[in-house]
Image (cartoon, helix red, strand yellow):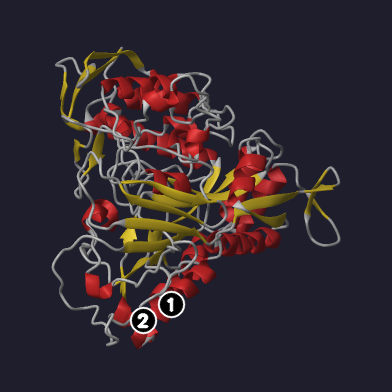
Amino acid sequence: MERPLLLKHLSLRMGILVSIGLLMTACGKVPGGNAADFDQSYPPSSGGTLIDATAGEPSGLIPMIAGEAAASAVASNIFNSLLKYDKNLELQGELAQNWSVSPDQKTITFKLKPGLKWADGKPLTSADVLFTWKLVTDDNTRTPYGSDYKLVIRAETPDAATFRVSYANPYAPALDSWAGLQILPEHLLKGQDINTTSFRFKPVGSHYYKLEEWKPGERISLVRNPNSTQGPPRIDRLVSRFIPDPAAQFLELLADNIDSMTLNPIQYSRIVPSREDLKQKLALYKELGNNYTYLGFNLKHKPFDDIRVRQAINYAIDKQELIDGVLLGMGEPVSSPYKPGTRWTNPDLSPYPYDPNKAIALMKAAGYTGRDKEGYLLRDGKRLSFDILTNQNKQREMSAVLVQRRLKEIGIDANIRVMEWASFIGRFIKTGDFDVVLLGWGLSLDPDQYSIWHSSQQAPGQFNFIGYNNPRVDKLLEQGRLELNPDKRMKIYHEFASILLADSPIVYLYAGYGLPAIHKRVKGIDNPAPPAGIGYNSYDWYIPPPLRRNEISQ
């Protein structure tokens, strides 16, 4: 399951605007009828609509409850955090004008910017920040994010512009955590059940945009928020159209009905470069994000509680085959739960090699000594058979097919089951009713992964849904949160990654490159992408008037 990136990543995941259902596109022509020159330079201007598509419809727009990328992508345009990351991944203030850390590293004091308002015009004050902290730490709030904020032993608001938190011990990811908590309005949510409130479908925030319309099963549209705490964005409207099938998204991109989408490797490296008309109107980008794809086992179900079975499956899967076949080489091998090339990645680790003989030997050691007439492994006369669950994502589906084939070669019967996202999360992940999942993790910039791997984080709705429990890992994760020395902290997480790799609670498959394609009518995008990704300055993107679609509304 994707954990929302704490970066305000490419959050303009918007779809087609239909003002009462009628939209006329310019189809590559300027209003006068001449062919548009999308490579021409234009001065920045305000206005226009950015059209995008997303594969999954959010389950709600309160990220601390939804816990999914689709919700975070939209909500990050609606809500603010105290801090954010700049293009070079350095922390800077968002709602906070400045902040200070006490000499003992246990207390952080945030000073809010003056004159902050919610989209409905009500003042945004430190009381809202305190209210949000109380929500995320309330045991009745079904959120996977509470652990970071429960370490705060005292939160206070000396005045309307000051929010102060204190910790029992220095907490290394503290500042990063405050870049990830989106602040909610007390005056609209006080006294409501945050888990079921209708606010999740009609949110009121403080960021660049506010909700205009949510038409279930079709689209979400946002419009510029005149009370934005960060000033006005250049683009007037963002609209997201829900299109689960990436092939259908690509057809919409080709038809000029959406402005951007994430391409698959074939589209990126073969289809677009081979067509002159597409090269003239589409700009391609490439960025390695903080995410990876994995095969995860339910450790509470047999035989996945047996490390030999997990390791056997790890050896049976050819990871390079996945990178070459599914990603066309546009990915990196993974051996730890961190972005390849960062200091948190243990350089001494490498992925399990493809070794079917070793896999078979481990399965025999686990008691699978016989085979049935179809060649599948048997233990006590019973075949090892299970479902690989994944969501409607073509790369994951293709990966599952290759994994299934390799497992069959060593005698394991794996079936593939593809689910719509909301059903996948509600029926299987939150209930723990699965054997094996093929999913992805999106991670924050800080290396702390307590909420994913600590044994205490296994309640419904929390991120350790596979049921991993290793006392040494628990201890390391606890130590890593308290260690402020970056070199010592790095060693802690290197050991953590080493144990995780040996235990094989998941099989790392690959870290794929993000391959966004954006119509050249959208200007102001950095290329090459900075460390924070191309979406770091999406508020400065603009669509020149000659390149905008003709929109007719009633």
As drawn, the label of residue 546 is: none
State the image coordinates of residue 454 (x, y, percent, origin top left).
48, 28
**SS at mark 1 in the image:** helix
427 and 328: which is toward the camera: 427
Residue 351 appears anywhere in the view: no
Quarter-of-image position of residue 147: top left
| Up-down relation of residue 259 to residue 66 (above or below) | below
Question: Where is residue 544 shown, x and y percent of the image?
Answer: 22, 69
Viewer-nearest residue: 175 or 186 = 186
Q: Nearer the viewer, residue 495 or 180?
A: 180
On screen, residue 479 above or below 231: above
First reached walking from the N terminus: tag 2 or tag 1:
1
Can residue 410 be seen here? The reply is yes
Circles 2, 1 touching at the beta carbon (< 8 Å)? yes
Check disc 1: other Cα within 10 Å, few if <14, some if 14-19, many if 20+.
Answer: some
Locate residue 23 relative to residue 429 in the image: left or right.
left
SS class, disc 2: helix
Mark 2 → mark 1, Cα distance in angstroms: 8 Å
In the rendered image, residue 482, in percent from the top left (x then y), is placed at: 30, 22
In the picture, the disc for residue 254 is: 1
Q: Is residue 223 left or right of residue 22?
A: left
At horizontal 21% and vertical 62% (from top left) the residue drawn is: 526
Residue 235, image quadrant:
bottom left
Q: Amino acid at mark 2?
A: Leu
Q: Amino acid at mark 1?
A: Leu
Residue that mark 2 sits on: 278
Residue 547 at x, y = what percent? 27, 74
